[in-house]
Image: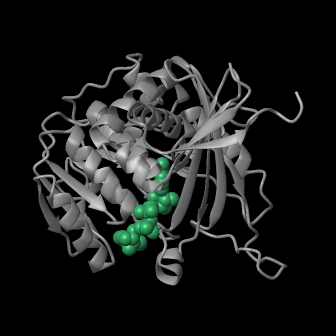
Amino acid sequence: MSDKLTLRFLNQDAMIAAGVTDMARCIDAMEEAFSLLGQGDYVMGGSTRNSHGQRVWFPPEPKFEGMPKGGPDQRFMGLVGYLGGKYKVCGNKWYGSNIYNPKDNNLPRSILTMQLTDAASCRPLAFMEANLLSGTRTGAVVGLSARHLAKEDSEKLGVVAAGPIAMYCADAIVKAVPAIKSVTVFDINAEASKRFKAEIEKLGVEVIIAEKMEDAIIDMDIVTSAISGSFTPDFKTEWLKPGVLLTLPGRINVEDAFIKSAYVVPDNWEMQKTYKIEGNMLPEGERAFPHPQLHRLVDDGEIAESDIHDLGQVVAGKFTIDKASDKPRYFISNGMILQDIAWAAECLKTAEEKGIGQELTLWDAPFRV
Ligand SMILES: NC(=O)c1ccc[n+]([C@@H]2O[C@H](COP(=O)([O-])OP(=O)(O)OC[C@H]3O[C@@H](n4cnc5c(N)ncnc54)[C@H](O)[C@@H]3O)[C@@H](O)[C@H]2O)c1
């Protein structure tokens, strides 16, 4: 092998040419990634090997001029890990999120890049624009949850919030569940709802803009929610149809009784437990971690850990959902580097086959070995 080290640089246009927006293919890549997760052929960062990522926790009241202020959806984050199977690559996704970006800077809320590295030799393989990559994989996992968990005759999809992530999720669910006929969307921003309608109608489904949030929840077979910011919506149990799938890349509140009656399916329960360990290490007053309600129910013995089954276990065939049952489904997803690695590796494969992107030279020969 030559001493020369090169990597492929893929900007947004190159990623599009490499098929990053191909949602149906991405759902299949997520199927592969979650099957590997279910078999345990992966390692994520941190000492539990299951950390979502290393977050830069800016203080709520910075003492230095120019230091960003912490808060909801105000963060920098590095997600690292290894995915085995046919991939055998390591990945690192780095992003910043500033909730004021669309209004103040005409930029998306978050800006992401992705690196892939060969796990055996440590050779860098690619550096990629990752907004499309990350959004597509977030939606695709929600689509995968619908493929495996939703009732097969699900016809009505409700969507709370109409931002970019909600659009990826709706696209994925419509592709994963062919029976979907209508999508009802609610957003506090009417313009966002109109943009959503224009995009999602292209998939050949009816899109209805709801006047109130509950109109996007009541009588729906599947409901997804991706609100940003500090507000957490309350979903009343009486609004939820028997057998409903709640598939949640964002926060909502539901009643304890609903969770206790449901199939509880996280993306990765060990990762959720690591979030709790890490969140509790923050200074008092800042302590926080996702899904405190589910952790409380487990800690109080109201839900047995043995009754929680990761999506990977379902995909790998280790746990079976009765798809015809009227038992509700509660799927929670915070995103994992394993999803980014799988989708980045698929896009890189296409880029290599088609000669897309730019070759960058890191060195012709190492300065020292
Ligand atoms: N689970 C994952 O893998 C994953 C990945 C990426 C993003 N996310 C999360 O998804 C969320 C959405 O991301 P985004 O990039 O679309 O954010 P965004 O800020 O661009 O859009 C959010 C939308 O929510 C709407 N909204 C805010 N408050 C609302 C309310 N009370 N009722 C209805 N709509 C409301 C806004 O008007 C906006 O249209 C973020 O919180 C983000 O952290 C999760």
Quarter of the image with the N terminus is top right
Applied colour scheme: one colour
Left or right placement of residue 312 versus residue 366 in this view: left
**Left or right position of 291 against 323:** right
Residue 237: x percent and y percent?
A: 31, 54
Image quadrant in which you'd find residue 192: bottom left
Q: Which quadrant does the C terminus fall into?
A: top right
Indicate the position of residue 139 as horizontal and vertical percent values. 36, 47
Residue drawn at (39%, 31%), measured in percent from left and top?
A: 29
| Front position in the image: 177 or 215 | 177
- From where the camera sits, is residue 246 visible? yes
Name above or below for residue 124 compared with residue 251: above
Residue nearest the observer in this picture, 155 or 127? 127
Instruction: State whether residue 12 is above or below residue 179.
Output: below
- The structure residue drawn at horizontal position 41% and vertical position 40%, both measured from the top left corner, is 260
Q: Is residue 283 left or right of residue 231?
A: right
Which quadrant of the frame does ligand 1 lie within? bottom left
| Mark count | 0
Q: Is residue 257 left or right of residue 76?
A: left
The residue that appears at 47% across and 55% down in the rendered structure is 131
Report which quarter residue 173 is drawn in.
top left
Q: Is residue 251 visible?
A: no
Relative depth, front residue between 86 and 226: 86
